[in-house]
Image (spheres, grey):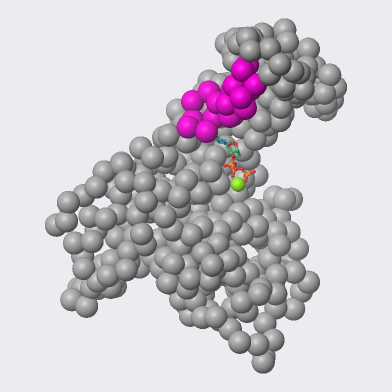
Amino acid sequence: MAQRKTKQTSTPAPETNNTSNVGRIPTPSDIKAFLDQYVIGQDEAKRVLSVAVYNHYKRIIYNQNPNRKMDIEKSNIILLGSTGSGKTLMVKTIAKMLGVPCYIQDCTKITESGYVGSDVEECLVGLLRTCDYNVAAAQCGIVMLDEGDKIATKGAGPSITRDVSGEGVQQSLLKIVEGDLVGVPPAGGRKHPEQPLIYVNTSNILFILSGAFVGLDSIVERRIGRTRIGFNVESIDMSDCDNVNSLVTPQDLKDFGLIPELVGRFPVIAYTNKLTEDDLIRILKEPKNAVIKQFSELLAMDNVELAFDEAALKYIANTAIDLETGARGLRTIIEEVLSEAMYNAPEKLNSSEHTVLRITEEEVAKRIEKRYRKMLDVKKTA
Ligand SMILES: Nc1ncnc2c1ncn2[C@@H]1O[C@H](COP(=O)(O)OP(=O)(O)OP(=O)(O)O)[C@@H](O)[C@H]1O
Ligand SMILES: [Mg+2]
């Protein structure tokens, strides 16, 4: 077997039919180690995704071998988790590591043929665009079907589900996610009979259906409760489980409003956890491109050194928790906190002295209070 390269940062999409090429795919632990540099926490999701991605690319190599014993089927992934918890970040980071094209399709933009909106094939047009219409590269790419919970059918799940065409969209996704030769109009939009099409084979494209799936937790809890009462079996100790999403079964996804055929094509279920105060503080400081590192670099160009007190970071993390936007809110808060400093910083260029800009908890509170306090107070009383 070829020598396995560890900590690889760019792996071309596997193309040949030599099984020894498996050595060119980073192992699950390589993938996780790469993710660790950018994504804080979410260990369980990182592990599940790393294995699924590793298997996906091994499968491609295996299925190209003319002497293979069987065809190995594709395992697309469902990724559940609250907003701003790192779902998109993880998928993009994996694609970056593997050097494969990746496209994020917002499922709320897709409608069933005949309705106003985009056809499901639009995700393949998007994928082709990300790699300059290199069909071979696109055929080994990753498509993230974001807001996938919004195509659940009405009536099955709680109120978040959309109109009746949700089922139509799910139906039209079936062939594409399973593997099909799909003709797509190069410029996107709806197909016209006389239009030349680009044909994309989707059998080696990895599809990741992701979303917050609000309300899925109550479906799981109801199921567990029902089991307890109905069959009097040993009750599941929920105190052991800090994330109900870890208990999600395919049946729960069906009860939520995904059609059984679609659930069957996404056999891997991964989930992210809500980010804690500690996670959010680490997100501010630790990732390779952490927000604070980015602003430190910008201010360093003005000879200003940025130094945040721990209490200030804690305050910022807790404001982000109150805003319920996960880590997404952190950057906005930091922008707010540093806006005055960034206005004044260029003046420092006139003096050659090195200045330390220390950000205290009081400073953060003063700046944040103005913009967010009212909003947070309204939330608390609601
Ligand atoms: N676990 C994490 N580690 C590091 N940064 C994170 C993490 N989670 C979120 N972030 C930061 O927050 C931003 C938003 O995260 P991301 O886009 O991955 O959220 P999401 O889970 O896809 O949310 P949504 O459901 O709203 O799409 C990222 O660009 C990143 O900067
Ligand atoms: Mg996202």
Kindly give the residue lying farthest to the bottom in the view shown.
Answer: 194
Q: Looking at the image, in which quadrant does ligand 1 appear? A: top right
Q: What is the quadrant of the C terminus in the image?
A: top right
Bounds of the magenta segment: 285-304
Q: Could you say where residue 352 lies in the image, as x and y percent from the top left?
A: 63, 12
Q: Could you say where residue 160 lies in the image, as x and y percent from the top left?
A: 72, 50
Which residue: 47% across, 40% down? 246
Which residue: 78% across, 71% down? 116
Q: Is residue 156 visible?
A: no
Q: Using the rendered view, name the quadrant where residue 136 is placed.
A: bottom left
Which residue: 29% across, 60% down? 58
Q: Is residue 298 visible?
A: yes
Position of 170 relative to 344 (above/below): below
Residue 297 lies within the magenta run: yes
Q: Using the rendered view, name the quadrant where residue 47 is placed.
A: top left
Give the side of residue 370 with respect to residue 242, left or right.
right
Give the side of residue 174 with respect to residue 295, left or right.
left
Q: What is the quadrant of the N terminus in the image?
A: bottom left
Residue 301 lies within the magenta run: yes
Q: Could you say where residue 96 lies in the image, as x and y percent from the top left?
A: 45, 50
